[in-house]
Image (tube, coloured by chain):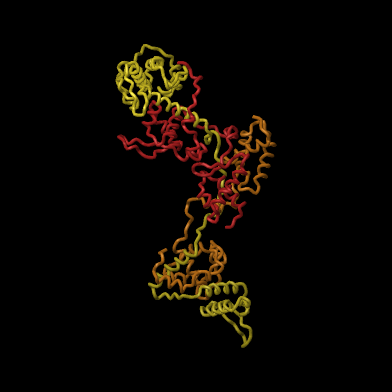
Chain colours: A red, B orange, C yellow
Amino acid sequence: MLTTPETAKLILEAALLSAVEPLSFAQLKMVLGEEWQNDQIRKLLQELQGEWANRSAELVQLASGWRFRTRPEFQPWLARLTTEKPPKYSRATLETLAVIVYRQPVTRGEIEEIRGVTVASSIIQTLMARGWIETVGHREVPGRPALLATTHQFLDDLNLRSLNELPPLSELVQVMSQESLPNV
Amino acid sequence: MLTTPETAKLILEAALLSAVEPLSFAQLKMVLGEEWQNDQIRKLLQELQGEWANRSAELVQLASGWRFRTRPEFQPWLARLTTEKPPKYSRATLETLAVIVYRQPVTRGEIEEIRGVTVASSIIQTLMARGWIETVGHREVPGRPALLATTHQFLDDLNLRSLNELPPLSELVQVMSQESLPNV
Amino acid sequence: MSQIELSVPIVTPLAQVLGQPFTELPADLYIPPDALQIFLETFEGPLDLLLYLIRRQNLDVLDIPMATLTAQYMQYVDLMQAHQFELAAEYLLMAAVLIEIKSRLLLPRPVVVDEDGFDDDPRAALVQRLLEYEQIKAAAYQLDAMPVVDRDFAWVSVWVEQQIAPRLPDIEVGDLLNAWHSLLRRTRLNQHHHVTAEGITVRQRMSDILRRLQEGASLPFESLFEVNAGRLDLVLSFLAMLELTKEGLVSLIQTQPYESIFVRLAER
């Protein structure tokens, strides 16, 4: 089937709007057909991104591919449609996640060492159930503890292409204000 | 929250693009807030419909509410993303078709003679329903069996201008004798 | 606190010191349950508490006054112990670590510079851990501040109209040839079936002629030939006509010599 660039762009848009997962470049190529060059497809994607600027959604490039997402500024309105609140993670969960993000692959014991407290199994389970972390191997020490790492989905869900887009740890040391903490 | 009609339209668009189910008018009203009149919302929806005309998706009103859907004409491309394998014809169907292609016009009895097995009615029906074969006459023998031949649509669907473009049988026989052909 | 073995290395897993000394806590101290609850939710362990104490008093992490810090820390641990707070074990380990560091600082020590040229400060390992933990805390805060799907944005997912017609199998010329090959291979084994190599185009023309004859009762012989189509095409049509006649599918009718020949479907 012969298609003009304008039609090809509409086809890409239709595919990306309706996809339930991010679409990889290879998948987008498959949709258009082999007669389309990588350069051409990249150009079409850029044009699409431009056309969607200042609209209700935007085309973003994630770790596992391209996807449309609604702009964060509309979330307060969209949230009115759902009764269930998105999960709010405890500090323990967030710190555990942070250790895995920055120190991966890492064992639970190593996380406990850094945090100085036991890491509850439920925390690991929560993060696994969310699809944000996974076991990528085992450390060859007694007990063969699982090595934990973040997943592609974690990057996708945080709208990141790679972990590189996160600020380096060294830049993060910024004194957390704890003025609000109670005196016990 | 005070919103301009333009922002309200973007909010509706974001809600409709991200909803997994059709959104009822009541839901759309809930998203925008009580300060918006039904008339205003209806007007915004109409404007949205207009803006999406000639795009990759369209805003449609269904029994259960409003939703975006991709335009049917893009379906052939989107279908390339589905991982399920396309259905295949059975060997019996393909052989029957091959006999009709090479020996047309031919009766079912003659196909059976060549194939050495009975040809199920369902096979003939499948090929007829596909529009690939048709009855072009009857052999004037007892029972007046139908003479089957391939159609123009068959040529079109296989992207052939004429059956000429199939290799002549004599070549086939030579190739065959080399026994290098795959078993179907 | 003196029951704690002071030689426990800082980096060993904490669970190893969950020893018996802490199973019987003094029960005569009273802390309001809500306060303990707040305490529980406020600090994520001994490192967090230490950082809080250090930062609250603007102490220099790199030059911690161990006596002050240890004293303050112990006040909190006493509170926790009173309530048989489960995490107390980890806090107690830290207490042990702090006391150990404090005592080592009190001892006269020779000025030892290690291979890396650093002064062997007993506080070094603790400082290292505190700084590392502080980074992780900041990272956790940062992660929480990032837009996350479903909380801060939604994925776009537009409905795809279901295809009305079921997907039909596609075939290629190759499929057809393969089918024919395997068929011929089989029929060669059964020699009594006479399958001859014959021009496929003649067969196609035969079908075409039959199609046309279905419409009218009989057609002039010439009308079945495309005069402008070239000689090859004429020959093709002629061969098709001969074959149709031979197979008894059509009848050729000529009422008188040199009159027009008519073609029609064969009748019995």
Give the camera-side residue of B164 and A104. A104
Residue A56, position in %: x, y?
A: 61, 39
Q: Quadrant of the N terminus of chain C?
A: top left
Numbered disc total: 0
Res C254 → quadrant: bottom right
Vertical relation: C77 (above or below) C259: above
Residue B23, position in %: x, y?
A: 60, 39
Q: Specify the farthest residue to the top.
A: C28
Residue C150, position in %: x, y?
A: 53, 35
Res B112 → quadrant: bottom left
Give the camera-side residue of A26 and B70. A26
Vertical relation: C176 (above or below) A130: below
Q: Specify the farthest residue to the bottom.
A: C257
Residue C57 in view in this figure: yes
Residue A142, position in %: x, y?
A: 30, 34
Residue C86 in view in this figure: no
Side (left or right) of C147 relative to C217: left
Q: In which quarter of the image is the C terminus of chain C?
A: bottom right
Give the camera-side residue of C169 and A74. A74
